[in-house]
Image (cartoon, helix red, strand yellow):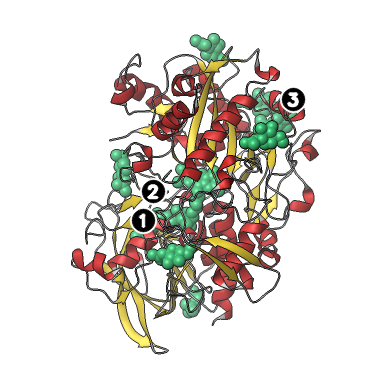
Amino acid sequence: MRHCSMIGLCYKFNKARSGGFPSPQQFAMWSSKLLSFVLTSLLASPALAATITQSTQLTTQTFDYIIVGAGTGGLVVANRLSEDPRVSVLVIEAGVSDDSILGFEAPFLGPTMTPNTIYDWNYTVTPQPGMGGRVFTYPRGRILGGSSTTNFMFHQYGSSEDWNRYAAFTGDLGWAWSNMRQYVQKHETFVPPPGPDSLNKYLPSNHGFHGTTFLSVLSENQTDIDSRVLATLDALHDEFPFNRDMGGGDHSLLGVGYAVTSGANGVRSSSSTSYLAQANGRPNLTVLINSVVTKLIQTPSTKGLKAFRKVQVASSPGTAPSPGGNPVISVTARKEVILSAGFIGTTQILQLSGIGDSNDLSALGIPTIINNPSVGRNLSDHTQLANVFSVRGTESYDSILRNETAIGAEVQEYLTNKTGLLAGAISNNLGFLRLPRNASIFDTVQDPTPGPNSPHWEIIIGNVYFNPDFPTPPSGSYLSIVTSLISPTSRKSSQSRFYEAYSHSTLIKHILIIRTGGTVKLASNNPFDKPLIDPQFLMTDFDIFTMREAVKAVLRFFGYAAWSDYIIGPFGDLFAAAKDDASIDAYVRGVCTSILHGVGTASMAPVNAKFGVVDPNLKVKGVDGLRVVDASVLPLVPSAHTQGPVYLVAERASDLIKSGH
Ligand SMILES: Cc1cc2nc3c(=O)[nH]c(=O)nc-3n(C[C@H](O)[C@H](O)[C@H](O)COP(=O)(O)OP(=O)(O)OC[C@H]3O[C@@H](n4cnc5c(N)ncnc54)[C@H](O)[C@@H]3O)c2cc1C
Ligand SMILES: *[C@@H]1O[C@H](CO)[C@@H](O)[C@H](O)[C@H]1NC(C)=O
Ligand SMILES: *[C@@H]1O[C@H](CO)[C@@H](O)[C@H](O)[C@H]1NC(C)=O
Ligand SMILES: *[C@@H]1O[C@H](CO)[C@@H](O)[C@H](O)[C@H]1NC(C)=O
Ligand SMILES: *[C@@H]1O[C@H](CO)[C@@H](O)[C@H](O)[C@H]1NC(C)=O
Ligand SMILES: *[C@@H]1O[C@H](CO)[C@@H](O)[C@H](O)[C@H]1NC(C)=O
Ligand SMILES: *[C@@H]1O[C@H](CO)[C@@H](O)[C@H](O)[C@H]1NC(C)=O
Ligand SMILES: *[C@@H]1O[C@H](CO)[C@@H](O)[C@H](O)[C@H]1NC(C)=O
């Protein structure tokens, strides 16, 4: 129904705003121009040796560990467990190989590769009541590396306060920042950006230099708007302070600076190109792609608990190399099954296996084996609102993206030298900001952030038309400023309950807001049916208030003199909104989508809590030999883009699994 990729590549024609826009066929034409360059420009990168493409190629059906999902979290665990040559590890991935795909190697092209391609799950959300009942695309990677292959490459760890809140929430100090910070060193190798002003873009003390995934600041030679951003930060520093390092963790996220990205030297670093590539030569690691896990099968109880060590696997629609596809088989784990299928896939597999809310399961004819109403509940996510300005001249990327000759030259430069437009990220600058202390909303609503050094909202500055789910205009140059709600409070139930959680340490005391949040539910008992995803966006006064204030802040930022010779004015819906609070709210509800940071659907909770899907060691409650290691275990969405936090969770999870055996 929607065919719109992120940078100016929209196939869908939105009826509601069709006036004056060209036809869907025209959009499709522009899109396919760029896409055809991307898809036909194959790269000669090394093949992924240990990857098998059909279950018939398996030489055994029994492994020590079986990891479901070769995504961000799953491939960290695969790497760390297979460091021990005495254990065997199988990873099962529904998607295809990421080998030799230019669109995933070149940072700038990543956003053009999903949704509605074979690399995506092609999900949409259910109608969102807080957004005028709108439905929009909800991409998730379906490829080696999962969403780390298809994401926009922004990389932070969240604030230390996020992790201290996770520790307080779970009662496990192992999740506190003082413990988690060690995993930064295992995870990242920061590559300083070239150029004399390199040290204005990052703090060496905030990074690791010997880890697995490459990070950098991919802003070199990218855009002429950087100097305007810096001039604005200088002039408006009380509201928008410059922050020299946007990596989070040890250093405050607050302020605006250069985006840290999961790539270096012009190349994306995904969990596949980093964690898997490093482990690929190990004989005891097998990666099976094109194969979807349809359910877990109950096996004899161990340690007095139910067990699910058998995994049912079918060929993945649209990816099987042979027309007949793979037979349905099952494989068994001697030690553990680890679910790393992401916050949607993991939830779906648990429910298909009879682990979930018994009312929901029985309605679909699935026998309940473990009744746990927390499965698929408490989803929380960040919003994404693209505020578009029209600008003068040809500095913005739009004119290049419309020009076949120019794109061809960029592709050539990238293939030859890994430099130029395609080597850079889609945004150079981003920032994390708080509402003013005296904002009126705090008269009635308690501050939902995990602490005073954590943001309420985010700004991302891109010198191009970027408005997912809305068509790109055929002409003109644009600047797109994404604003995102980072501390959402939306919940389904109208009661808001508060409680204080104290960990056994006196160091960590936090007030936690209980949120019911959104849901991921099965639509049917068919594992190939898409689940119902309902993030419940913008359902509280706080959430709409913060989005509204962010729009006003954007208008202040870009109203500064440094922009006057560049910006013509707010474009499209933003133009109509720049009037009063009511019109801003209507604009937000009418345009906003998701920045795709869902967490919480298989949440951690204290060992004895009556809610939660996994315990603080990530073991599924009431089950032996089954863990979850992906974004779904985070109880609340962190104050950052989510890949960095997922990498840290997976690094610690690997230590927990190893120490448990
Ligand atoms: C388009 C997009 C842009 C984003 N941009 C950013 C960004 O710029 N910065 C950032 O930090 N975060 C970003 N995110 C979010 C971030 O990438 C995710 O939070 C993170 O990668 C999630 O990791 P995960 O391990 O939970 O799941 P994933 O990485 O999605 O891995 C799950 C894997 O499991 C596989 N799988 C699912 N079901 C099954 C099944 N039944 N059988 C077999 N395999 C299965 C999937 O195909 C996938 O490979 C973005 C996400 C998207 C989708
Ligand atoms: C690991 O691989 C070696 C060589 O292929 C094999 O002999 C051994 O049995 C494997 N170990 C496990 C635990 O599978
Ligand atoms: C997503 O859409 C594309 C294009 O229509 C299709 O080829 C692919 O198989 C779809 N993926 C899934 C998981 O349905
Ligand atoms: C959602 O999370 C809260 C804690 O924030 C918890 O009290 C509640 O029980 C959870 N709801 C479900 C359905 O798990
Ligand atoms: C397209 O790009 C080429 C090469 O950069 C340039 O010479 C040409 O003028 C551009 N065409 C248009 C219509 O802008
Ligand atoms: C690659 O870099 C070299 C050296 O800087 C340069 O001479 C050449 O023109 C570049 N190639 C392309 C295609 O941009
Ligand atoms: C930017 O320019 C410098 C020197 O001119 C060069 O070394 C570097 O590779 C370029 N980076 C990109 C991403 O094009
Ligand atoms: C908050 O304080 C600032 C000055 O510190 C003032 O300009 C502003 O009007 C105040 N806002 C509200 C909502 O009180």
Alpha-carbon distance for marks 1 and 3? 43 Å
| First of labels 3, 2 by sequence position | 3
Ligand 8 - quadrant of the structure image:
top right
Alpha-carbon distance for marks 2 and 1? 8 Å
The location of residue 346, given as percent across then percent down, is 39, 62
The location of residue 132, given as percent across then percent down, is 34, 36
User: Ligand 4 near label 2 (Cβ, under 8 Å)?
Assistant: no
The image quarter containing residue 429 is top right
Mark 2 and 1 residues: CB-CB less than 8 Å, in contact?
Answer: yes
Q: Is residue 466 above or below residue 95?
A: above
- Residue at (41, 30) in percent of width and height: 586
Of the pair 543 and 117, the residue shown nearer to us: 543
Type of the residue with mark 2: Gln
Q: Quadrant of the N terminus?
A: top left
Type of the residue with mark 3: Ala
Outermost residue on the front side: it is 443
User: Ligand 4 near label 1 (Cβ, under 8 Å)?
Assistant: no
In the picture of the structure, the residue carrying the numbered disc 3 is 231
- Residue at (57, 46) in percent of width and height: 443
Q: Is residue 103 above or below residue 57?
A: above
Type of the residue with mark 1: Thr
Q: Which mark is residue 519?
A: 1
Give the SS element for disc 2.
Answer: loop
The location of residue 367, given as percent across then percent down, is 22, 73
The image quarter containing residue 460 is top right
Of the pair 212 and 391, the residue shown nearer to us: 391
Q: Which mark is residue 536?
A: 2
| Label 2 crowd bin: few (<14), some (14–19), many (20+), radius 10 Å | many
Outermost residue on the bottom side: it is 304
